[in-house]
Image (spheres, coloured by chain):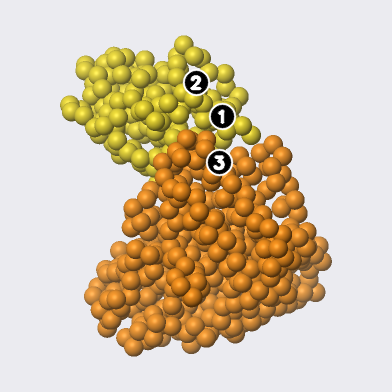
Chain colours: A orange, B yellow
Amino acid sequence: MTSQASTALPLDVPSIRADFAILGRTIRDGKRLVYLDSGATSQRPRQVLDAERAFLETSNAAVHRGAHQLAEEATDAYEHARERIATFVGVRSDEVIFVKNATEGINLIAYAMSNAATAGPDAERFRIGPGDEIVVTEMEHHANLVPWQQVAQRTGATLRWFGVTDDGRLDLSNIDELINDRTKVVAFTHLSNVLGTVNPPARLVTRAREVGALTVLDACQSVPHAPVDLAALGVDFAVFSGHKMLGPSGVGVLYGRRELLAAMPPFLTGGSMIEMVWMARSTFAPPPQRFEAGVPMTSQAVALGAAVDYLTEIGMARIAEHEHRLTEATLRGLAEIPAVQVFGPTPTGSTGTSDRGGVVSFTVDGIHAHDVGQVLDSLGVAVRVGHHCAWPLHQRLGVPATVRATFSLYNDVDDVAQLLDGVREAQRFFGTV
Amino acid sequence: MRLDQMYQEIILDHYKNPHGRGLREPFEAEVHHVNPTCGDEVTLRVHLRGSGTQARVEDVSYDGQGCSISQAATSVLTDLVVGRSVAQAFGTLDSFVELMQGRGQVEPDEDVLEDAVAFAGVAKYPARVKCALLGWMAFKDAVARVGADGGRTNTELERS
């Protein structure tokens, strides 16, 4: 790793790192922190922290209720954040629903579908029951698998899934059989949180539309790392989390196409989401309010708006290119170390690894992932170890656990070098090579 | 941080040359425990002679996969409980749990814990404590299923 390689990176990492105070700390007896776990949660720049604090110190109030000045300002800040986040992913602001996290977003759709059976004729499109099918993939995060297992269990529908090929891509060879007239929903990840594989939404969306099935995109690992236009992708629903995109925890986004949200029954009910309430019954507000029951997370949404501003200013295309270079460097470096197995798409000819995001999972022969992670931690390198909430995928890969490095805009080639050195150190320590 | 504080030579020895590994007959109970955060798992059988807490642990056999800490701790377990009464084995287990949950503040008694004192360094790393306890909790559960645990409750099992 030379300084020449460093200067060739699209982003000015030192100036970016200056915005992230946490990256300046040391860990484990003075080691420089190498944070390669942004796929689990990203760090937050000063601008995001400042935005949250500024909101709380000037305008904090419960939104969408009250007529005092603070309530007005808070509501404006909350809705302004919604507008910027919507623009960031190419959709209308009334198609953006704030949820606690992506997991809640998927559960919201899943429960709305369960509730559709008793929600009147408007909800017909969402009804699901015996004979209907739900299609997921073998590479899903548990968040986009378990809720669908539960829908199947509650409603009598059947859960089916796409397999994963040996090179870590979706096996779409049986797409026309798997997505058929019985299919009600197709839920899939945009970018695998283990393999780094970028899936082709167009292919799945086209087939789903042919049979009238709804599509749900898990965009948790794509939206923070590359330009994503959800409207252009044509998916019906999508989710992503704030804390993986330099924003706060406790806020995520559910996107839904306008006409679908207008017809979809609510999941959580109570304050804020109503139109009229009588003692025996209620009617509901239009979206997005219908899906935001109770006083929402406000400072978090405002801060997520600031995170989107931060990402936009740096430029998502440049961020994607930057992380792509780091991913390539990591794949090259790991390939040079004996007895290391990397999972997911590998470079293929001139196309490189364009269908792969900034996620690199691997195992080291003879050393359990936990133990590799412990050695890395002792050297200041923070990675994720385990099954990364994708246990069935690990069963498919035939390994109980992997080591996962994930990149963000604040990583550089020194981080990659330290990771690679750490892997060699683990081999030396455990005497495997 | 010094890696050899956690990975003491004793631990690495047990990891590379595990004692008592493999599933054997006869047995009165077999349990399967997993660590849901990492996917490590162990299948463990106990063979007891006699009844109640005075029953003698004739054999503990196991199979599974996991990190060096979980594998070595299960290997050490077999050394410390086989050939002893359930009451003695549970006394050792209590000491081991106390050591592992002590955040590095508990001074281990080498007369009781023998090779298991090597895990004192692991106790400083909360994320790895569950690894060390995986096989031990499986043993506790298996004995309870035989009904020789002297009335320890499932709640207690879950808490530890």
What is the three-letter code of the residue carrying label 1? Answer: Asp
Q: Secondary structure at mark 3?
A: helix
Mark 2 = which residue?
B117
Quarter the N terminus of chain A occupies:
bottom right
Which subunit holds the residue at mark 1?
B
In this rendering, position of residue B116 left or right of residue B51: right
Which subunit holds the residue at mark 3?
A
What is the three-letter code of the residue carrying label 3? Answer: Glu
Q: Which mark is residue A363?
A: none
Q: Is residue A42 above or below residue A220?
A: above
The answer to which quarter of the image holds residue A31 is top right
Q: Residue at x 29, y 35 (%)?
A: B63
Question: Label 1 vs label 3: CA separation?
Answer: 13 Å
Q: Which mark is residue B4?
A: 1
Mark 2 vs mark 3: give the one in front. Answer: 3
Q: Earlier in the sequence, mark 1 or mark 2?
A: 1
| Residue A299 in view | no
Question: Label 2 vs label 3: CA separation?
Answer: 26 Å
Which subunit holds the residue at mark 2?
B
Q: Secondary structure at mark 2?
A: helix
Q: Residue at x 32, y 14 (%)?
A: B84
Residue A243 position, x and y percent, is 61, 62
Q: Is residue A83 above or below residue A250?
A: below
Q: Residue at x 57, y 18 (%)?
A: B107
Mark 3 is surrounded, within 10 Å at the Cα level, by few (under 14), some (14 to 19) or many (20 or more) other residues, namely some
Residue A331 position, x and y percent, is 52, 60
Mark 3 = which residue?
A425
Mark 1 is surrounded, within 10 Å at the Cα level, by few (under 14), some (14 to 19) or many (20 or more) other residues, namely few
